[in-house]
Amino acid sequence: MTGTSGETGAAQGSIPTLAEGPDVCFRAIAKHLGADAKVSEISSFFSVGKEIDPSDGKPAGEMTSCSVQYQSPDDPRKLLNTRLDLNSGQFSPPSPVEITVMGGNAAEFRLDDYLIPLSQVDAAALSSVMTAQKGRLSSVYGNYAWSGVRLSAPGPFNNRHTLRLDLTGRLAANDIKENGYASVSTDGKTITADHLMP
């Protein structure tokens, strides 16, 4: 099973892996933007390997994407997006994010309500949450892997930022592929929504 956390660092030029910690993408973003950058959303995804998904051509745990939406340093009303180039280890030039308001008054929208300083998000602490789930997940999944670590912005179902752990596995009973996720508080300690089990 993949999804363990370690302190080893990736060699320069190598593709980051989940074994370096669930916050591996978050650390890269902090290094690029600074720990005090205000972010809206972060998405990092990892290969689950051929055992779980035969179409997955990468080794289990290898990062497949790392991107962030953050407040523009030049205009605080605007969001920018950048993505990590996994081959070069460099982030792409920032591109603007078009903000749309659904189900509310666009004139009352405040971007600050959808931002959190990166320094207030502890994705590294997710390793304890992941480890704590091993027993119950192993009782249902013959094999599973953590496939995503994300920071989600406030939305219709949550009025604050949350971390999200995505999981993909094969059920022990019938080998059917199943996806699940858990929402976790931004300190990385408390599960606020548990949809890991089928």
Image (spheres, helix red, strand yellow):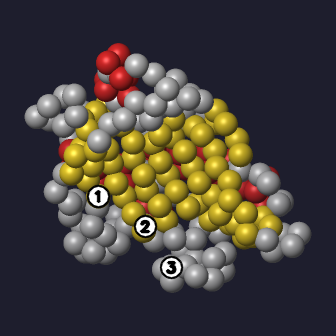
Q: Residue furthest right?
A: 173
Q: Alpha-carbon neighbours of circle 3 within 10 Å: few (<14), some, or many (≥20)?
A: few
Residue type highlighted by circle 2 = Met
Residue 139 at x, y percent in the picture: 83, 60
Q: Residue furthest left?
A: 74
**Location of the N terminus (image quadrant):** bottom right
Q: Secondary structure at mark 3?
A: loop
| Residue underneath mark 2 | 63
Q: Residue furthest top?
A: 108
Q: Alpha-carbon neighbours of circle 1 within 10 Å: few (<14), some, or many (≥20)?
A: many
Closer to us: 3 or 147:
147
| Residue underneath mark 3 | 59
Circle 1 or circle 2, nearest the eye = 1
Circle 1 or circle 3, nearest the eye = 1
| Residue underneath mark 1 | 83
Residue 156 at x, y percent in the picture: 56, 29
Relative vertical location of residue 76 with respect to residue 86 in this rendering, above or below: above
Q: Alpha-carbon neighbours of circle 2 within 10 Å: few (<14), some, or many (≥20)?
A: many
Q: CA distance from mark 1 to mark 3?
A: 21 Å
